Image (spheres, rainbow, N blue to C red):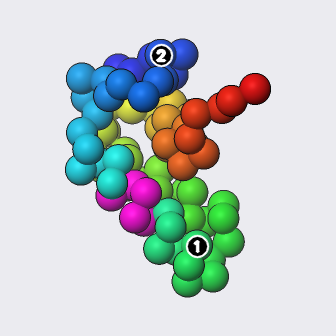
Amino acid sequence: MTDPRSLGDEPSPSETPACRDAVQRCYSGLCRCGQPERYALEAAVTVYRYHHPESSPVQAETIVSHWLAGPVRH
């Protein structure tokens, strides 16, 4: 299980570049088609959970949101 507190630029052992790419393609493709951002996020979380069924819904949304928003810089 991925600890959301350890989300950085380094991939976790369960993270694969193909999964992250699929999540980002799903989200950006739906946004380009005019779908609401919330729907695109929900679809991207579904793609993530397909690749990582062990992840809880909250954890999956946290990880996907981080991937889509990029690192927070203050």
Residue 37 relative to residue 54: left or right: right
Residue to which mark 1 is pinned: 31
Q: In this view, does 64 lie above or below 10?
A: below
Q: In which quarter of the image is the N terminus?
A: top left
On whether residue 25 falls in the magenta region, the answer is yes
Q: In which quarter of the image is the C terminus?
A: top right
Given residues 29 and 73, the one toward you in this image is 73
Q: Where is residue 65 in the image (x, y as percent from the top left)?
A: 57, 43
SS assignment at label 2: helix
Instruction: Tell me, yes or no, if residue 54 can be seen here.
Output: yes
Three-letter code, disc 2: Ser
On whether residue 8 falls in the magenta region, the answer is no
The stretch of residues the image draws in magenta is: 22-26
Q: In this view, does 5 lie above or below 57?
A: above
Residue to which mark 2 is pinned: 6
SS assignment at label 1: helix
The residue at 30%/38% (across/down) is: 52
